[in-house]
Amino acid sequence: MSQRAGVDELAAFRQSVRQLCREFGHDYYLRTSEQAGNARELWHALGAMGALGVAIPEEHGGGGQGIEALAIVAEEVATAGSPLMLIALSPAVCATMLAHHGSPEQRAEWLPGLADGSRVLGFAITEPDAGSNTHNISTRAVFDDGDWVISGQKYYVSHVDNADALVVIANAEGGPESLPPGPKAFLVPTDAPGLKRTEIKVEIISPERQYSLFFDDVRVPADAVVGGADGIRVLFTGLNPERILSAALLNGISRYAIDKAAAYARTRRVWGVPIGAHQAVAHPLAKAETALAGARLLTQAAAEAYDRGETGGVAAAMAKLAASDAVSLALDAAVQTHGGNGMSREYGLATLSGLVRLFRIAPVSSEMLLNHIAHKALDLPRSYG
């Protein structure tokens, strides 16, 4: 359980992050995307001010304020026009797994660097044939002569080129008696012999690229397992923060799009009046603003629940679902408000369309979120295994 910061403290923190992010913005996001730069300057600046480590325990170099504070970082980065997916992975999924389940040695090795941005962890779980069925993954980790030997394939793994290591979910076999078989999280260096990667070309503009990974008998030491016998519980510790942080990123994109559209609608004049005076322009933006308000409340509630030590699964699912719907509405309304200019790179809206569409699929699809909500909140029968 994290120590929740006060309202005034969180507001001051938000303002500090906002001020920093404004120094970068959407033009920077586009430039670093084109240059394959991974937005490292922004990442290191966030690390230097303590924003990346705000949810990491204080004893490991972080701020100890929890996922609610980290969600503020994600939202403000996106509001400034630089929605970095890495925020939902390295300091959220991976750092949370290590903080809750890592050995003292793993925490000492990784958490301080994750907090200050000097180190990055990727997360490899998705497989071509498993999809959303985590229990059906085929990547194996076989215990052999004191090492784990990993073989298999992972799919759509982000920023492998920018990570020091990966948290890889694989089925453990033949380990010590204290480690039952089944899904486990393994720390695997990105330069490990036998690990090969191939970039997946996707139709989004982002400094974070996607990869297929091939594990050809990749050896890692026995202590590479995160959480030991905790097994799949380690995985679920990180999934809800990922959904909450994804929702926060999407809320930031909504805020960015609506603000740009409203400013344009106030100043663009046709037939002698600002176009925002016309209900055909104003009403879609008002609907988008209302949807965003609801998504933000759900996201905050999910983050607070997680920081209180609750599982927060339904709340996190609702937040991600609501944010995905809201941002689709917001970006579409913003582009329509701009007319032809909405498709111009200069106006910085259409450049986000691929990323916004991606978030209805990843890191978990809207359909699977609806399945979870129906089963857990409404007690309806499961439609999946």
Image (spheres, rainbow, N blue to C red):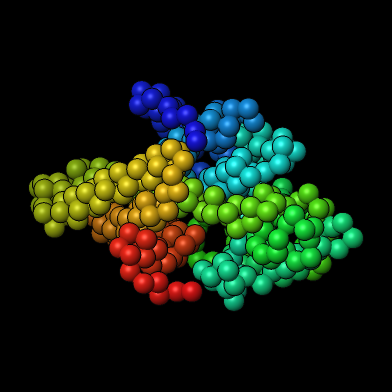
Residue 109: x and y in percent read: 73, 38
Extreme-front residue of the structure: 177
Extreme-right residue of the structure: 145
Instruction: In the rendered view, tell whether residue 33 sits above or below residue 142.
Output: above
Q: Is residue 147 visible?
A: yes
Front position in the image: 368 or 52: 368
Front position in the image: 145 or 89: 145
- What residue appears at the point 54 percent right and 54 percent down from the top-left corner? 236
Instruction: In the rendered view, tell whether residue 106 sits above or below residue 148.
Output: above
Number of labelled discs?
0
Residue 339: x and y in percent read: 26, 59
- What residue appears at the point 84 percent right and 57 percent down from the top-left corner? 147
Front position in the image: 57 or 47: 57
- What residue appears at the point 63 percent right and 27 percent down from the top-left corner? 59
- What residue appears at the point 42 percent right and 67 percent down from the top-left corner? 368
Residue 220: x and y in percent read: 81, 55
Q: Is residue 21 visible?
A: no
Q: Is residue 337 left or right of residue 43?
A: left
Q: Quadrant of residue 217?
A: bottom right
Q: Is residue 5 left or right of residue 50?
A: left
Residue 259: x and y in percent read: 29, 43
